[in-house]
Image: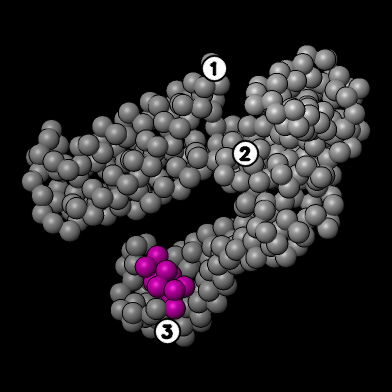
């Protein structure tokens, strides 16, 4: 019951955060685009320029809140911290906008903050940034700081640069290679500095663009190589792990196709290529190893199935899966009925013999027994009790 409450609380946190993000964007756009009536306790104290600034920044904050909502959806602790910081900001912006449209944003932000705080235990995943991602973020920030601070320090050698805002505006416009021409260097020193800003900023944006495009490129390669990307693995949630590949795997996948999200973990390269060609999520690895199971999100999985026609391999995979996720429901197929108890001891919740059930159904069908399904279920219950 505790798990259900945490799951519902996490979903509520994510949905409310999405709602606040959309409301922040919509409220900001409305207050910027059209004059609205100034109401509320701050109506007589908020200058017009502050209201307009709050509307503009509220729209930007809404998009930043969307990033936090997506992080919460994946269960990241960093997303929880980010949302915790941004929600008071959206509430304050709603108050400063002081219009009849902005106060729902204040209410939603306050309620969402309480819900997010109450469900902090539901967001425990650590975010691990790749080297490329760290390089992109670091280079982008460093280039913008370099351009802004340098332009401000040389402001007397620039035309129309008087404040840090002007300096940042020049840096951002230069980095985008737009060049409006309203802010220009007036001396050789300023021109040389401007060229350095252009080179560094464009390079930093190129690195960031590479980070954005890399997952898409990896996804295309994974289709040919049979390897899921980190982005695809991170998206897995409430899924089923199919441990290994055997004669029953195709039938299992057909049953799962329209019922649940799943990923196959196998070191059979021929099977990997065949499954990848049919757009089946597959991870090339030994299903009895801990690392690939962690990569496949075993902590977020609903169930696991082991039915490779090799009871020893299945037992090892089940044992590893059970150690990594004690609450995971594990079903297994057994080739020899005497191994039912062994797979049970390894950690399987349900163990069945496809051969025994198939034989039973064949005999029932041959004898014209219309109640074969009930008898098959009874046999399944007997097999479960053999342990």
Kindly indicate the quadrant of the structure image that contains residue 77. Answer: top right
Range shown magenta: 168-177
Q: State how far apart marks 2 and 1 are (Cα).
A: 20 Å
Residue 239's label in the rendered image is: 2
Can residue 109 be seen here? The reply is yes
Mark 1 or mark 3: which is in front?
A: 1
In primary-sequence order, the first of circles 2 and 3 is 3
Residue 253 rendering spot, x and y as whole percentages: 68, 45
| SS at circle 1 | helix
Is residue 212 covered in magenta? Answer: no
Residue position for label 3: 187
| SS at circle 2 | loop
Residue 2's label in the rendered image is: 1
**Residue 283 drawn above or below residue 33:** above
Mark 2 or mark 3: which is in front?
A: 2
What residue is shown at x 57% (from left), y 71% (from top)?
Answer: 206
């Amino acid at each position: 019951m505790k798990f259900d409450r945490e799951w519902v609380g996490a979903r509520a946190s994510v949905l409310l955060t999405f709602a606040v993000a959309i409301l922040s964007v919509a409220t900001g756009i409305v207050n910027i685009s059209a004059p609205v009536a100034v109401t509320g306790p701050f109506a007589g104290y908020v200058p017009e320029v502050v209201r307009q600034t709050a509307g503009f920044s509220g729209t930007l904050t809404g998009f930043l809140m969307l990033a936090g909502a997506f992080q919460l959806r994946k269960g990241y602790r960093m997303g929880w911290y980010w949302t915790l910081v941004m929600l008071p900001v959206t509430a304050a912006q709603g108050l400063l906008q002081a219009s009849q449209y902005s106060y729902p944003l204040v209410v939603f932000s306050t309620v969402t903050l309480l819900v997010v705080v109450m469900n902090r235990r539901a967001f425990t995943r650590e975010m691990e940034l790749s080297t490329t991602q760290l390089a992109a973020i670091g280079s982008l920030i460093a280039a913008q700081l370099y351009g802004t601070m340098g332009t401000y320090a040389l402001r007397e050698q620039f035309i129309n640069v008087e404040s840090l805002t002007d300096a940042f505006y020049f840096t951002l416009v230069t980095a985008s290679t737009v060049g409006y021409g309203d802010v220009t260097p007036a001396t050789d020193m300023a021109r040389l500095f401007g060229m350095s800003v252009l080179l560094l900023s464009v390079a930093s944006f190129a690195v960031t663009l590479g980070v954005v495009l890399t997952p898409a490129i990896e996804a295309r390669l994974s289709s040919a190589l049979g390897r899921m990307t980190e982005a695809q693995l991170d998206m897995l949630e409430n899924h089923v792990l199919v441990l290994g590949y055997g004669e029953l795997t195709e039938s299992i996948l057909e049953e799962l196709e329209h019922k649940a999200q799943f990923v196959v973990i196998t070191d059979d390269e021929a099977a990997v290529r065949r499954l990848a060609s049919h757009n089946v999520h597959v991870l090339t690895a030994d299903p009895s190893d801990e690392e690939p199971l962690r990569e496949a999100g075993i902590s977020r999985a609903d169930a696991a199935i082991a039915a490779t026609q090799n009871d020893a391999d299945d037992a090892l995979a089940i044992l590893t899966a059970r150690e990594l996720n004690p609450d995971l429901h594990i079903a297994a197929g057994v080739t020899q009925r005497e191994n039912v108890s062994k797979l049970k001891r390894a950690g399987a919740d349900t163990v069945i013999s496809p051969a025994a059930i198939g034989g039973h159904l064949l005999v029932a069908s041959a004898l014209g027994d219309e109640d074969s399904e009930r008898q098959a279920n009874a046999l399944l219950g007997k097999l479960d009790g053999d342990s």
